[in-house]
Amino acid sequence: MPHSVIVIGAGFAGISAATSLAQKGYQVRVLEKNSMAGGRARVFNACGFKFDMGPSWYWMPDVFETYFKQFGRQPSDYYDLIRLDPSYRVYWGENDYWDIPAEMAEIEALLEKAEPGAGTNLREFLAEASYKYEVGINDLVYKPGRSVLEFADWRVVKGVFKLHLLQSFAKYVRKYFSDPRILSLLEFPVLFLGAKPKDTPALYSLMNYADMELGTWYPPGGMHEVVRGMQTLAQEMGVEFLFNSEVKEIRVTNGTASEIVIADGGTYKADIIVGGGDYHHIEQHLLPEKSRKYTESYWEKRTMAPSCLLFYLGIDKRLKNLRHHNLFFDKDFDNHAVEIYDTPQWPSNPLFYACVPSVTDPTVAPKGMENLFLLMPVAPGLEGDQASVREKYYKILMERLEHVTGQNVRDHVVFKRSYAHSDFVSDYHAFKGNAYGLANTLRQTAILKPSLKSNKVRNLYYTGQLTTPGPGVPPSLISGTVVAREIEKEFKNA
């Protein structure tokens, strides 16, 4: 008889783990709290608009290709992709913006115009970033992080200086560039990793390589089409999905997870349990205290990546001066970062992001209308995301959007929904209402992350953004693959 597996949570990591295990011959069932797969990448429809609820950037297409390839498939079997050109727009102020081209020669020319020599320097900067991407994405992130011996024969030992693991991103990037706009452009991907650029290893220039060399893509229909594709593949592999099935308890007998209890009182048994939901919630609230690897004080000391305040807006006209992706950097970058990481508080002059997928995809909004998604990064664990606070920031963001792009938007909003900390907690049991997971700091890298294997419950594993390799959609895909490999090693002959 093949081993049976229950995966808790149908986010990217949970589906990835479930599909990988099913391919290896395991009987896999996924229990999902919500009514559909995707986790933070769920979707909803309202008033003729289709809104992706979370991830909206499709970066690192090679990771998705590698994922599907292991099952003898390719992404195009399940969804289409369009490369965006320009990749995105960055607003520095009123009538002051850069459109970031898809072609590298055009990016170099853009930076050269801002700072003499920057085009040549970008070429050198990205050549080093390419090496980091190859080592980081193809080697480091596939390590399970269970022992320092995993890295004994790894290229990082010989290339530690080339990877710039001990140098800050901020210091490193300033060796190449001085123009503040170029610095902001290169530092913005780091903002979501969980630390300011000065506290993030320069290794993460690999994100700039992913951005500028590999490009920004879009799956028509929205990011949830990727989820649909992954779910379809999982079902082809024999995975069973049970939705509206929130796990309320994991019963442990003699050091083994013996039974799972869901909200309606139903119970399930399996040989192996994979926690693909929020690691902190599963460990601290579903397990008996004696079966927890970590203490609550351990979790309180973890550095979390940001949360965010989101607005999903339906607009009854077409908008001007906006691309598919738009970054509003018309306020001080460093000050907002301090208010996220150093002195956590609701921001005074926030940067924000606006996504208008209907610029590319007419299926996500009624004809002649626009789908507008606003995101403001904020510190995790903040109190007071009540309606009045949300409305305050809605007004701030919309005033800035209207001023910088030169148009009236608020009078044309026909649908509006907000989403913040308390919603992340309610829908995903997200620790401190985080949106992105555990921060990628040096003290929370590889073996220093929460382990993907429980040392108290012999058949309990974890996957997702609070364990190896870290936050983001591509790392979550990889996380599911990694935990499946570890389970196969330990149960193959059991």
Image (cartoon, rainbow, N blue to C red):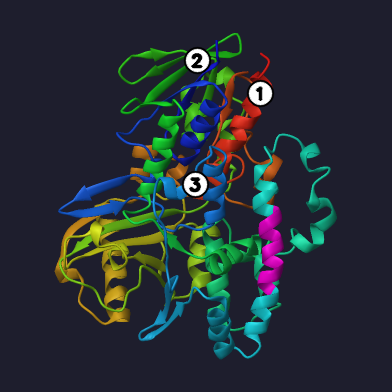
The answer for how far apart the CA atoms under marks 1 and 2 are is 18 Å
Q: Residue at x 66, y 19 (%)?
A: 492
Q: Which residues are magenta?
A: 125-135
Magenta residues: mostly which secondary structure? Answer: helix
Residue 164 picture location, percent across and down: 75, 62
Q: Which quadrant of the figure contains the C terminus? A: top right
Using the image, tell me which numbered label, if any, was put on residue 455: 1
Residue occupied by mark 2: 270
Residue 323 picture location, percent across and down: 35, 72
Using the image, tell me which numbered label, if any, was put on residue 74: 3
Q: Which quadrant of the figure contains the N terminus? A: top right
Q: Nearer the viewer, mark 3 or mark 2?
A: 3
Q: Nearer the viewer, mark 1 or mark 2?
A: 2
Residue 455 picture location, percent across and down: 66, 23
Quarter-wise, where is residue 199 in the image? bottom right
Q: Is residue 494 magenta?
A: no
Check the image and report above or below for 150 versus 407: above
The answer for how far apart the CA atoms under marks 3 and 1 are is 36 Å
The answer for how far apart the CA atoms under marks 3 and 2 are is 31 Å
Mark 1 surroundings within 10 Å by alpha-carbon count, few (fewer than 14), some (14 through 19), many (20 or more): some
Numbered disc 2: secondary structure: loop
Mark 2 surroundings within 10 Å by alpha-carbon count, few (fewer than 14), some (14 through 19), many (20 or more): some
Q: Residue at x 57, y 71 (%)?
A: 186
